[in-house]
Image (cartoon, rainbow, N blue to C red):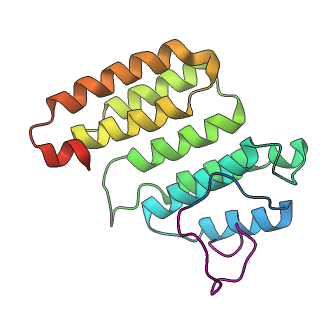
């Protein structure tokens, strides 16, 4: 993925920060999705699903037609349902919910879908992880859901304030 997305050889020097979008064509992006489908680590699956969704969401830099872009949500949902969560890593659905939020960004999800996802995130037992996932959802929400975003940000602030250790508040 690190070579396909930026379209450069894996051994070439590059900035290690994952960019928000890539000028990539449909066959190469399909290859990235295929590779994601073989990954096992939750955080990597989330990271690259986010990169795919960022690329699709930015119509100005992508070389993918709207029709082609419409293929990706179903492919990514299939990966999420097959791969997340991996019982060898984090046991809750945090990365599954966060990855789904990225897919909702590119698939015009309804308010009810966003609210259901938010309810699922609220069920995460670990308070720090719950705050993290709710933050991802808030950032992924479309402009038309500004009121929900504001409520989530307030909720996240309260969750952070309730954390007992300063280490959890910054990690």
In the rendered structure, does residue 37 fall within the stretch colored magenta?
A: no
Residue at point 15% right, 29% down? Answer: 162
Residue placed most toward the observer, 49 or 153: 153
Query: Whole-percent x and y of residue 145?
Result: 57, 17
> Most prominent secondary structure in the magenta stretch?
loop
Q: In this image, 162 relative to 156: left or right?
A: left
Residue 104: image quadrant is: top right
Query: Whole-percent x and y of residue 16?
Result: 53, 69
Q: In this image, 99 relative to 9: left or right?
A: left
Residue at point 80% right, 48% down? Answer: 71
Query: Whole-percent x and y of residue 49?
Result: 60, 54
Residue 169: image quadrant is: top left
Residue 63: image quadrant is: bottom right
Q: In this image, 167 relative to 119: left or right?
A: left
Residue at the far bottom in the pictured view: 11
The N terminus sits in image quarter: bottom right
Question: In this picture, is 30 found above or below 155?
Answer: below
Residue at point 28% right, 26% down? Answer: 157
How many numbered dots are placed on residues in this image? 0
Query: Whole-percent x and y of residue 127?
Result: 22, 37
Query: Which residues are the magenta region?
Result: 2-17
Question: In this picture, is 54 found above or below 79?
Answer: above
Residue placed most toward the observer, 37 or 99: 99
Residue placed most toward the observer, 20 or 67: 20
Residue at the far top in the pictured view: 147
Residue placed most toward the observer, 129 or 80: 129
């Amino acid at each position: 993925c690190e070579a396909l997305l930026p379209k450069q050889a894996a051994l070439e020097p590059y900035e290690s920060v994952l960019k928000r979008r890539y000028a990539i064509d449909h066959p190469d992006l399909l290859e990235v999705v295929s590779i994601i489908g073989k990954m096992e680590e939750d955080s990597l699956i989330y990271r690259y699903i986010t990169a795919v969704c960022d690329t699709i969401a930015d119509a100005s830099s992508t070389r993918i037609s709207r029709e082609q872009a419409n293929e990706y949500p179903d492919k990514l949902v299939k990966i999420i349902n097959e791969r997340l969560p991996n019982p060898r890593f984090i046991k809750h659905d945090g990365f599954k919910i966060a990855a789904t939020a990225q897919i909702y960004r590119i698939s015009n999800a309804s308010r009810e879908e966003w609210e259901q996802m938010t309810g699922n995130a609220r069920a995460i037992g670990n308070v720090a992880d719950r705050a993290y996932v709710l933050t991802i959802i808030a950032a992924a929400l479309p402009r038309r859901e500004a009121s929900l975003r504001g409520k989530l940000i307030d909720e996240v602030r309260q969750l952070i304030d309730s954390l007992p250790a300063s280490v959890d508040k910054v990690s």
